[in-house]
Image: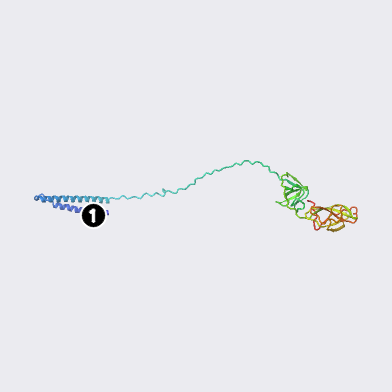
Amino acid sequence: MNIRHLHTLAKPLLLLMTMLVVALACNMPSQTSEAPDEDAAITAAAETIQAQRLQNTLEAQQEMLTQQAQTLQAPQPTQEPSALPSPEAQLTPTETVPVPTFTPVFTHTPEPPTATFTPSIPTIIASVDTNCRSGPNKLYPRVGYLLAGQQSTVHGRNDSNTWWYIANPNRAGEYCWVWAETTTVSGNVAGLPVITPPPLPKVADFTLSFSNLHICGGVGYMIFRVENIGTESFWSSQITIRDMTHDTGFSGPEDSNTPFIASPGACPPGAKELEGGKIAYVAKGIGMSLPSGTKPDRRFPLWALPGPDRRA
């Protein structure tokens, strides 16, 4: 109920109680009136008691209403808004500071290196111009050369130490073989590895030298020693003898399919084949004794074969 409504209601109630009291007072017996009879006295006393009770009740109700009105009219305590924290006072997110982690670092102080002996690479120098071949034999093709006084390094050898495996002076990063007879090596060669060469190529090559004069059946023959230094067999020969003193042809050319005799004292015909690595003799008839001062021609061409290389 509203406070204003309670206050408005209290005023009529207070007026009503006042009127009731006045009315009761008007009905009260006068002091100058006659003495009532006994019944009238009892009735009057009862009414007086009842009126008093009613008045007390009204007063009590008025007191209660007044207290209620005062209670309602009293200012109610208002709850003040709680003070909001100022922006400055508001908590700001606390920045997470990374905690550094400790990683132990171990340092190693290396010990001074122990001196090790590194054997020097042997060197080689040519005493004459020397062919450098793809293998330790004259039958291998030439792939370079070591000129007289030129130097290189040695990296291997053959099993008989007659050929050296060297850095090719003419092709960087490649190697070749030189003959030991025309070179000089400096340094320790005992530790050099034995190099296995490639297979011998199949080539036809030979050497030729004059051996002697020989008479066969009353006819004079010039005998020549021939060695097959290749891997291919020879099957024929063609011989020409030339007078080198007078620079004139002396005899031939003469072809033969059985030219290879077994010794310088033998007479033709001979064998038809001279195998690789074998030695034989060939004869060329001149029909008479050679004139004084005549030198035999060293040329001994075989069918489509080149002359010998004299530098290994």
Residue 53 position, x and y percent, is 18, 50
**Left or right of 46 in this view: 77:** right
- The disc labelled 1 sits on which kind of residue? Leu
- Which residue is farthest left? 34
- Closer to the camera in the image, 278 or 161: 278
- Closer to the camera in the image, 91 or 87: 91
User: Can residue 20 be seen at all in this image of the molecule?
Assistant: yes
Q: How is the image coloured?
A: rainbow
Q: Secondary structure at mark 1?
A: helix
Q: Residues within 10 Å of mark 1 (few under 14, many from 20)?
A: few
Residue 102 position, x and y percent, is 52, 44
**Left or right of 125 in this view: 72:** left
Task: Residue under label 1, please give it.
Answer: 9
- Closer to the camera in the image, 26 or 89: 26
- Closer to the camera in the image, 91 or 39: 39
122 w.r.t. 298: above or below: above
- Could you tell me how many numbered marks the image carries? 1
Residue shown at 17% from the left, 53% from the top: 20
Residue 167 position, x and y percent, is 72, 49
User: Can residue 247 be seen at all in this image of the molecule?
Assistant: no
Q: Quadrant of the N terminus?
A: bottom left
Residue 258 position, x and y percent, is 84, 57
